[in-house]
Amino acid sequence: MANRHLSRSIVMQNLFEWDFAHRPQSEIEEMVLRNVSEFAPGLSDLSFVKSLTKQVVNKQSELDSVIQKAAPEWPIEKISIVDRNILRLGLYELLFSDRKEVPAKVAINEAIELAKTFGGENSGKFVNGVLGAVYKELGEPGKDEVSQKKASKEKFNIPFEQMPVQRLAGAVVYAREGEELYFALVHDVFGHWTLSKGKIEEGEDEHAGTIREMKEELGLTVKIVETLGRNEYVAADPERGKIRKQVAYFLAEAEFADIKLGTSGGLDDARWFKVKDILDLNFYNDMLPIITKAIQILSATPAK
């Protein structure tokens, strides 16, 4: 098999030159051939290099938008040319590549290695932080498969009972305004509406953690009504390997007030929706049973 790490290094060289010299798209083909000839003569993966270079360039605006939302404290023009093009490359593979060919962890790890090779002292950590944030907002692709493939070709083959545990909590936040029932939902940078959730801090109970997260992410003060459900899954963290994520979901009531979206990376909107309007929204599949249960409970509960 062709050396894909070398091929990605050439793609990185192409993107750097394209960005630094402001090359027009019409010159990309010639640029790719020249760089392959200079840095990797005889490379058998030329079609991969050509295709990936052109695809990243074509998706530049979308990729830069994701970078800005995942790292809002770093304007795109303030990120070094090397780092921003490594991020573009890593994000493209994370978001748009076939995951059977490029699993999420591979996309992230390859980008980190490029950053260590071509970037500055802190480039690897920076790239890891941004891509890691995007990976989490994606819903950690591969989490379902990981739980079903304990004998698969994982980098860290840790027994289930020995995996570190991370506790999270989220909520279906609702409010009543007159005769209408509303739900507060957040929108991620990948086009999905989902539930607000976050990590429970050390020493914090689930209710307190949920109330704090809703305040931080939505700007709403909530009251926990009841538990909607729990799930546990195995996720692959780029640095820690396999971890067990235990999530508790609650039904929580709030006043119908303005939502103030927090600054956590990966989210770009938060709104109230009437029940009838959420049916056509784009949700992650694992959110639907939780939201459906909340609707059923509230539909059977008369307004006060």
Image (cartoon, helix red, strand yellow):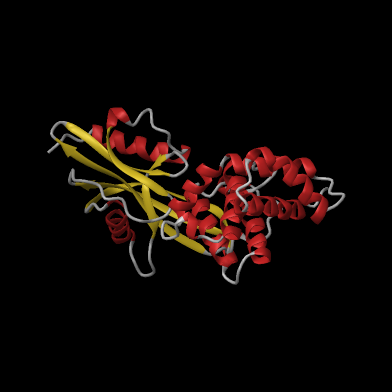
Q: Residue 299, position in %: x, y? A: 24, 32
Q: Residue 139, position in %: x, y? A: 49, 47
State how many labels appear: 0
Q: Is residue 286 above or below residue 13?
A: above
Q: Residue 136, position in %: x, y? A: 49, 52
Residue 42 appears in the rendering: yes
Identified at 57% across, 44% down, the residue is 95
Identified at 36% across, 51% down, the residue is 170
Q: Is residue 7 above or below residue 115?
A: above
Identified at 32% across, 54% down, the residue is 262
The answer to whether residue 135 is left or right of residue 32 is left
Q: Residue 12, position in %: x, y? A: 67, 54
Q: Quadrant of the C terminus?
A: top left
- Residue that sits furthest to the right in the current view: 42
In depth, the one of 19 and 71 nearer the eye is: 19
Identified at 68% across, 55% down, the residue is 154
Residue 229 appears in the rendering: no
Q: Is residue 202 above or below residue 219?
A: below
In depth, the one of 260 and 255 nearer the eye is: 260
- Residue that sits furthest to the bottom in the current view: 121
Which quadrant of the figure has residue 38? bottom right
In depth, the one of 61 and 154 nearer the eye is: 61
